[in-house]
Image (tube, rainbow, N blue to C red):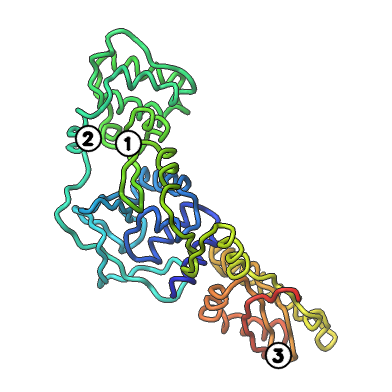
Amino acid sequence: METIQAKMFVRSLNNSSAKIVMAFLLARTALDVQELREWTGLKRETIYDGLDDLRALGKVEKQTLAHGRVVWLPAGDILPGFQMSEKWTPELQMSEKRTPSLLGGGESINLTLSTDSINPPGDQESEKRTSDFPNAIEILQHTDLLFDGALVVGRGLEDCEPLTVLAWCAYAYSQKNKLNGAGGLVRNRLKDKEPPPESAKLQWRDILPRDFLEALDLMEYTCEICQVKFKKMSELNEHDATHPKPHICGWCGKTFEEEIDLDAHVDEEHTPKVIIADESVTVSINGGITAEQAWQSVLGQLQMEMPRASFESWVRDSKAVRYDGNTLSVGVRNVYTRDWLESRLQSTVERLLVGIMNAHVYVVFVVGETEP
């Protein structure tokens, strides 16, 4: 698949996390945030939110390369065959093990990861960073951001170990919908000097929300251009404006000095075409159904036979646009959809039309035409 078509497909998806996952699958490499922006068309904040959600689920990992570039790459079972090693570097090689296609059939993509000497994350990293943490009282002064305005206060908490405080905050935050007084749980557990659950101690950074971590200076964002690091997203956004850089089209790679010119280019070149049908599809065939009705019958059968996600992504919006007595032209939204349907469904829909129209009909898929 060409990169331009792949990016068009990724941007056509509705869910931001799905866009990120599919970008990894189709790019077949680790990606930094700027590259994910180009693949998905999402804002930086949305990408960070999506990565945070996926990281909390153990689906992606963050890695800082030797020269300071921060990249993200799949972990766990986010992609079958795209496997993390203990040292998790993003260099990709072709694997003997083939992965099942996530696009509803067709060719599979072989992915695996090779490794270098980078230590895995875990408790050692958390303990090493404890000296850089704010103290217990500083952490508790911001718990209103976690527990709907309620602060965790109490005598004797000032000597609590910061990592323990963060872990109990993370546990209570993850369970607050099930608890009455999540802040009180934190206060009581710290007062009783109970050790936090091991999972909360290891994963507090993935559980706690960004605004809380930013308030404690525990977040770090990296400029994708100059690698300067910032503690707050707002600071990174302000810094980003200082870089004079062209606006890049994520589909075709063309650059524009002004964002308005990029928007006009995308509207003209990459916006899905309006599917216009002519009168031939509404004429009764030998006193029976029309070509338009025949195609609707095909859609009904495909909807029952295909996985729902594949049908919604590739088939649902197709439309009969022309019929000349032998060939039915079916309009689709873009080039990638046309290629997908030609390679996977052409023989199937021709077979279905034989039963519906009682005649062999050739089917061609065309990108929808615009109004004159």
Identified by mark 2, the residue type is: Ser
Q: Nearer the viewer, residue 69 or 280?
A: 69
**Place of residue 215 in the rendered image (x, y in percent of width and height, measured from the top left):** 38, 28
Who comes first in sequence, dot 2 or dot 1? 2
Disc 1 secondary structure class = helix
The residue indicated by pointer 2 is 126
Name the N-terminal-most of marks 3 and 1: 1
What residue is drawn where x is 42% and y is 39%? 233
Q: Are marks 2 and 1 in contact (CB under 8 Å)?
A: yes
How far is mark 3 from mark 2, CA to CA?
Answer: 70 Å
Q: Earlier in the sequence, mark 3 or mark 2?
A: 2
Image quadrant where residue 217 sits: top left
| Mark 2 to mark 1 CA distance (whole Å) | 9 Å
Query: Disc 3 marks which residue?
Result: 359
Residue 104 seen:
no
- 196 vs 162, nearest the viewer: 162
Between residue 247 and residue 284, name the one nearer to us. Answer: 247
Instruction: Please name the amino acid that badge 3 sits on.
Output: Ala
The label nearer to you, 3 versus 2, is 2
In which quadrant is the N terminus drawn? bottom left
Vertical position of residue 22 compared to residue 96: above or below = above
Relative image position of residue 111 (x, y in whole percent): 30, 67
Left or right relative to 262: residue 79? left
Q: Which residue is mark 1?
A: 205
- Residue 105 x, y percent position in the rendering: 46, 73
Q: Which mark is residue 214?
A: none
As helix, strand or loop, the secondary structure at mark 3 comes to loop
Q: Outermost residue toward the left?
A: 117
Q: Position of residue 179 (x, y in %)?
A: 44, 23
Mark 2, Cα crowd under 10 Å, few <14 / some 14-19 / many 20+, is: some
